[in-house]
Structure formats: C-alpha cells, structure tokens
Amino acid sequence: KVIAHRDSVEKDVHAYLSLSDAKALEKAAEVDAKIAAGEEISDLAGIPGAIKDNICISGETCTAASRMLEHWVAPYDATVIEKLKQQDFISIGKTNMDEFAMGSSTENSAFGPTRNPWNLDYVPGGSSGGSAAAVAAIEAVWALGSDTGGSIRQPASFNGIVGLKPTYGLVSRYGLLAFASSLDQIGGLTKDVTDAAILLNAIAGYDAKDSTSIPQDKKDYKKALVNNVKGMKIGVPREFFGEGIKPETKEAVKKALAFYEKEGAELVDVSIPHINSGVSVYYIIAPAEASSNLARYDGVGFGYRAEGKDIIDMYIKTRSTGFGEEVKRRIMLGNYVLSAGYYDAYYLKALKVRTLLKQEFDEVYKSCDVIAAPSASGTSFKFGAFSDPLSLYMEDICTVPVNLIGAPSISIPVGFHEGMPLGMQLIGKPLGEETIIQAAYTFE
Ligand code: GLN
C-alpha cells in the first residue's frame, strides 16, 4: 500500500533517487511467513522505510545526490543498515538530499529538488529533504537522515514531522558518506515520537568500526514514552528568541512552553551568549572538514571520471564537473581556512569558540534537564527564496550550535503558519535521549 501510494504522489514530490521495490516485497513476504509461523518479530519488521542516499546499502547505488557518485554502488552495508537488517527492516528506496548533505533546502541535489508535500511551491528543507518529505507524504513510514548542522531537525520542522538527532557517538557513522566528521550523526525522521524511540532502539549502540562511537549499555528508549514532565527543568536561552526568529515561530514555541508549565515543568530563563557565533563557527569547521573528506573524489577511487590530457588535468576536470557549485564553494572555503597564514585566524579560533560554546551549555545543564529552541526561524520558504548562499547559511542559527556541542535534539511539530508547519527543538544533555523523548511524547 505504501508503494502504491508512493507511486501516486512521487511525480509531484520527488522524494526518492532510487527505488528498491523488488527487494522490499521479497522481505515483506519473508516477514509475513514469520508471522504466519507464529515467530516473534521486531517492532520494525516489515515496516517500509526509506534511507537517505548518503548511507551505504550493499549492492545499491549511493549517490549523495552528486554527479560524482551517480553510478557508484556501495560494496558494503553501513552499520545502521546492518542493525536494521537484523530487525527485518524494509527499505523501499534511497531519498533525495542536498549534494553531500550541504544545504538547507534540497535545492542543491544534482538530480532536481524535492518538493514540500504541504505545498509544492515550497522547499522541504534540507539536507534530508527527501527523507522528511517521504514521511510527511506517507511515501514511507519512517526514514533515516543525517544531521551535521540541522539536516534532520530543520526538514522535520518544515514537513510537520518528528526528527531526532542523537548524541554524537550514539549511532555509528560507519558507512555514512562523510561531510564533517566531528559533526555528522545519523538519526530518524518519523511521523511521531513513538516511532522515533523505536527507530533509535534499532540503530543506537557502540560500534568498533567508528572510532568516535561511545561505549555504552543498550537502552530501551520505548521506556521513555511516558506522559509526564512534572518537575522537569526546561531552559529557555534568550539567544534562540532574538531578532532573526519570526514572530509566529516565537509564538508557537511559547505556547508549547506554556503547555509544559501547566503540566508541572519549570521554565528557566538562561543565556548562552556564544549561540550567536554558532553559524560563523560552523561555517569554518564544517567546510574545513569537508575539504579534507571530499579530497578522495579524484576520479580514481570512486565514481565519476572526466577525460584529461594527463593525470593532473583529469583530477581538475573530474572535480570541476563532478561537484556542484555549493560543494565547490565549501571545498574552497575549507581549504582557505586551513591554509598557512589563515589557520590560526579562522580554524583555530573557531575551535576555541566551539569550546566556549560547550562550556556555556554545560553550565546551563547544571540547572536544566532540557533546553528549548525553535527548529528554524520560520516555516519553509519558496524555491529560490535565497539567492545568496550567506543568507541561507544564517537560516541554520537554531540547529548548528547543537552539533557543535554533540548534544541530542528532537524536533517536534508545534503549529502552523499560513498552512505550513512550525517546529520546536528539545535539546538534551549528551546521552540524554530519554529525557527529550519523554518531554516530546508528553507534548504530543
Ligand atoms: N544546512 C547545513 C549545511 O548546509 C547543515 C547541513 C547538514 O546538517 N547536513 O551545512
């Protein structure tokens, strides 16, 4: 049924880059047989999902929405896929995204944009725009995305669904095409908080193949699906409610916070001054790491190769024609901030401010269990609304601070403005997924 529905709306939405119906139907029959035989099945077994096209599934193309990897077939499974396979998961396709996860609108896909199912003139957000639109349009029941600076939470917000970015290190990055390794994290996009907990159960856990994976005991996040916020302390940082945030967003988030207060939570007015430097710091660190991570796409090891008169010419032509404008902009920016003479002034300074930001968050965590913030400055916007890249970067103000400190955050729908959804984030302490799931569940 999901496949049939997908086929009826996909020509408008364009959430997918490739489909895997034959394999999906085969798996569904296997799960049916297990049920018929009275075997116990997992929560996710047989539920059709979709996977962002920067996560490797053995034998399937993994393009990162780039010409560079248009025909590249992944030779192995990402750890999250391996885990999902153990749960008899079903993937009905790989979803569209901004090229190499660089963007906030899915307009940077080399294979055409995804459209927001609430209104096709609007962007679905990004970079996991295909995953979010697929879930919102019921073209999949759940989807995996990746979040380096907001790419799960902002599209979740723009599509009126739930998006959970886990603590850095909780979910293995093995098999996720790297963008900015100190910030990247895989997470789920789902229609509600219960599904978010189920999906996190399936993908979380230590992995020796990811050197930044956190050794930890397995938790059951479904236990956090409790309707109670009595005594919970919710920090409300002034900096997240400044000039750049639209009045309708502030109003919707404040209404949600009033609900929490009524339910017995305590709102704490706090300040995290370096939130205001978040975008500047992010747009130095993320491109710096990207310039290094993307050096491997040289026409030799992976995917696309252009003809050249010698090897240097081949490198240049491959990278000039294989990457899109935004990816090239980030690579140049990253090489610039890492180059001799500029390293201290930009990269090193950004690392120092990142530490200050972390210290300020840690201070707030001493008196708060959760921190509330908008997921984006407003609702989704129309295609082409941001003609210059810098003003689109500024849109990431609410989400990037969370990646810089590695904390978990869940975006939940909190209302509408002119027919388009608005979202709020509940940011937890590192490894505090249970608390934000509980708070989110109580609101739902
Ligand atoms: N919008 C941000 C960027 O363009 C975040 C992207 C992401 O989280 N992958 O880098």
Image (spheres, rainbow, N blue to C red):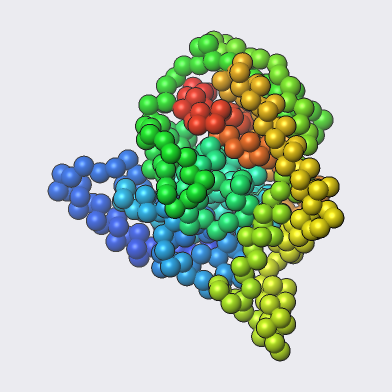
State whether residue 397 appears in this view. Answer: no
Identity of the residue furthest to the left in this view:
37
Give the residue drawn at x 46%, y 66%. Answer: 74
Give the residue drawn at x 34%, y 53%. Answer: 85
Provide residue 190's location: percent of width, then percent of height: 48, 41
Frontmost residue, 384 versus 105: 105
From the viewer's perspective, is 174 left or right of 43?
A: right
Frontmost residue, 88 versus 114: 88
Up/down of 141 relative to 269, above or below:
below
- Which corner quadrant of the image does residue 375 belong to? top right
From the viewer's perspective, is 391 left or right of 90?
A: right
Up/down of 305 relative to 186, above or below:
below
Q: Number of marks in the image? A: 0
Give the residue drawn at x 62%, y 31%. Answer: 424
Give the residue drawn at x 49%, y 24%. Answer: 435
State whether residue 380 appears in this view. Answer: yes
Frontmost residue, 444 versus 177: 177
Provide residue 50's location: percent of width, then percent of height: 46, 53
From the viewer's perspective, is 24 left or right of 17?
A: left
Provide residue 264's location: percent of width, then percent of height: 54, 10
From the viewer's perspective, is 14 left or right of 87?
A: right
Frontmost residue, 193 versus 406: 406
Provide residue 205's location: percent of width, then percent of height: 41, 41
